[in-house]
Amino acid sequence: MTVIESQDHRDLRAAVAALGRRHGQSYDRAALWAEAGKLGYLGVNLPEEYGGGGGGISELSIVLEESGAAGCPLLMMIVSPAICATVIARFGTEEQKRTWLPGLADGSLSMAFGITEPDAGSNAHRITTTARRTADGWSLTGRKVFVSGVDIADATLIVGRTETASSRGAAPALKPCLFIVPRDAEGFHRSVIDMELQAQEKQFELVLDDVRLPADALVGEEDAGLLQLFAGLNPERIMTAAFAIGMGRYALAKAVDYAKERQVWKDPIGAHQAIAHPLAQAHIELELARLMMQKAAALYDAGDDAGAGEAANMAKYAAGEACVKAVDQAVHTLGGNGLTREYGLAKLVTAARVARIAPVSREMILNYVSHQSLGLPKSY
Ligand SMILES: Cc1cc2nc3c(=O)[nH]c(=O)nc-3n(C[C@H](O)[C@H](O)[C@H](O)COP(=O)(O)OP(=O)(O)OC[C@H]3O[C@@H](n4cnc5c(N)ncnc54)[C@H](O)[C@@H]3O)c2cc1C
């Protein structure tokens, strides 16, 4: 890994930035998604033999960061190509790869990802969505919450757990398994959650009521579920970092432009250090977060899942905090205009918080680093 971006990466950044500028903040999500897919950006991390670009999460994170920096973040990239397609590419059967990957790569198909449950939240060990074997496949029963984009995705990759012989009778051991559930499967009910977010992608509560699935709805091997899950979660964290950095850069750029123009004393407000320094600080913190994101992506792409885990968590933490701070300072820089619809920054105050909460909260990352990196004892 080098900290200096390759020419290919810089070219990719410039090309996505140009696409983002064409679509802008009032973008049509579906149109942008289709165009990005056609240009190969959504599948840049997927194997070439299945229609992808043959790159990695390093390239995919550039695409999401630059679309966000242009004000039109492709949020579903965090789940569709980064988690779902990665898991299928690494662990899926040949048929699953042929069925899903070319469409996920060119954007003609997309997949949501459902792990969060109302009674489990940050504690994934408490997941109760259960898969039982039937004569010809599986029956899935449970509930999920806050799952993004279920209405626009062709299917949702649902994290459930199977009942194993060893767990029967005793306290059930966590044995996660991943199932591809088509959007219109019978018994798969969704209701939209009334969020304050103004994002184009909605969040859903899901009820899985004896959803009958064919045997091949299970991704890969039943016994490799945990491994598969972790293979998808590191890209998710790296991509959330990209989402946060993109949003932070967008807000910062708006604030800097405004601070150069707005004049209420003899110089533009950007000449006041009380305005300039927090913006400079936000820029530094976003750049630092990107460095950690690039490290995490490089480790992941080099096949070091364990090393990528720590870096991906740290990158998500740093980017989430930098984003919240950048957006807050941007809104403040615009004074009253920071809260108008016209300038489009106020809605980011809520959106930025997503990067602090999801997919894993700031506190759970601090727990991870306390325990895994520093070896401190656990309180829970
Ligand atoms: C906009 C949005 C989109 C989302 N999209 C998806 C999606 O597509 N798919 C999906 O599966 N999920 C999705 N989520 C869910 C998200 O991953 C969860 O909200 C997140 O994991 C936190 O879970 P929770 O909301 O249940 O909070 P809780 O687990 O209830 O936590 C509440 C608070 O308690 C703190 N806390 C909990 N445990 C500890 C502890 N041990 N130590 C210290 N503090 C602790 C947390 O940090 C947090 O601040 C989305 C959420 C949002 C807001």
Image (tube, rainbow, N blue to C red):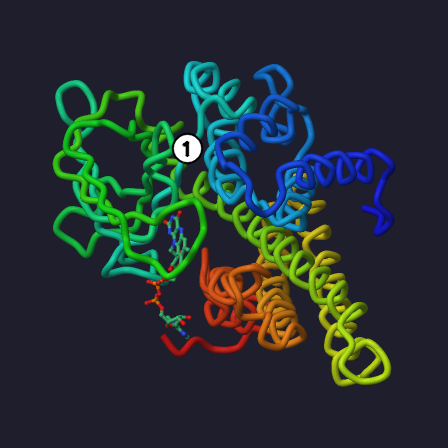
Query: Quadrant location of residue 24?
Result: top right
Q: In the picture shown, does residue 308 fall above or below 256?
A: above
Q: In the picture shown, does residue 28 fall above or below 294?
A: above
How many marks the image carries: the answer is 1
Q: Residue at x 34, y 58 (%)?
A: 195
Q: Residue at x 59, y 26 (%)?
A: 35
Residue 53 appears in the figure: yes
Q: Secondary structure at mark 1?
A: strand
Please indicate whether residue 167 sits to the left or right of residue 356 in the image: left
Q: Residue at x 29, y 27 (%)?
A: 182
Q: In the picture shown, does residue 31 fall above or below 298?
A: above
Q: Quadrant of the C terminus?
A: bottom left
- Closer-to-camera residue (78/47): 78
Q: Residue at x 82, y 76 (%)?
A: 268
Kindly identify which residue carries mark 1: 111
The residue type indicated by label 1 comes to Met
Please indicate whether residue 277 sits to the left or right of residue 72 in the image: right
Q: Bin the neighbour count of mark 1 within 10 Å (Cα to Cα): few under 14, some 14-19, many 20 and up.
A: many
Residue 243 place in picture, x, y as percent: 59, 51
Residue 275 place in picture, x, y as percent: 75, 80
- Closer-to-camera residue (241/25): 25
Residue 141 place in picture, x, y as percent: 16, 41
Residue 302 appears in the figure: no
Q: Quadrant of ligand 1?
A: bottom left
Residue 149 place in picture, x, y as percent: 38, 41
